[in-house]
């Protein structure tokens, strides 16, 4: 069996964010949205967030609401460490998806 025949498509995506109050807020939001499909690994200095749902979306206004203060794209970039999947960083959110149209279509929420 060749490599191409062994490869299986999946919907796994993930992000890593530095530990802290921002990470706690993001986890709370994603846990509410994804439930048990969100896998959280505490790596001490950072949190690894993964799902097989095919999409992780962090809306900055939702994070700001939990934190009780402004949370912008720049604030997100400060705590964002890495990802796997197809990323799209927009003014109001970060999306990592398995979809081929990430960054091409307009996400209206």
Image (cartoon, rainbow, N blue to C red):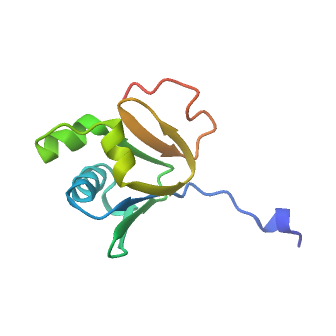
Q: Position of residue 15 (x, y in %)?
A: 45, 57
| Residue at image point 37% right, 36% down | 93
State the residue at coordinates (44%, 61%). Answer: 50
Q: Quadrant of the N terminus?
A: bottom right
Query: In the displayed image of the protein, which residue is found farthest to the right?
Result: 2
Front in this rendered view, residue 22 or 33: 22
- Residue 84: image quadrant is bottom right
Snapshot quadrant of residue 107 = top left
Which residue in the rendered view is the most extreme toward the left? 68
In the displayed structure, does residue 5 sit left or right of residue 9? right
| Residue found at x 20% / y 58% | 21
Image coords of residue 96 (percent x, y): 49, 46
**Quadrant of the snapshot with the C terminus:** top left
- Residue 4 or residue 44, whichever sits in front: 44
On the picture, is 23 further left or further right than 77? left
Numbered disc total: 0
Give x and y (percent) for residue 91: 39, 29
Answer left or right for 85 relative to 75. Answer: right
* Up/down of 36 relative to 26, above or below: below
| Residue located 51% across and 50% down the image | 54
Vertical comparison of 77 with 19: above or below: above
Query: Residue 38: x, y in percent?
Result: 37, 61
């Amino acid at each position: 069996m060749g490599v191409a025949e062994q490869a299986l498509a999946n919907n796994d995506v993930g992000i890593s964010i530095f530990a802290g109050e921002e990470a706690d807020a993001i986890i709370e939001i994603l846990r509410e949205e994804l439930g048990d499909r969100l896998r959280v690994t505490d790596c001490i200095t950072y949190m690894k967030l993964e799902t097989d749902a095919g999409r992780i979306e962090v809306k900055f206004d939702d994070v700001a609401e939990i934190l009780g203060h402004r949370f912008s794209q720049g604030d997100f970039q400060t705590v964002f460490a890495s990802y796997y999947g197809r990323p799209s960083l927009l003014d109001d959110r970060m999306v990592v998806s398995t979809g081929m149209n990430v960054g091409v279509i307009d996400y209206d929420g």
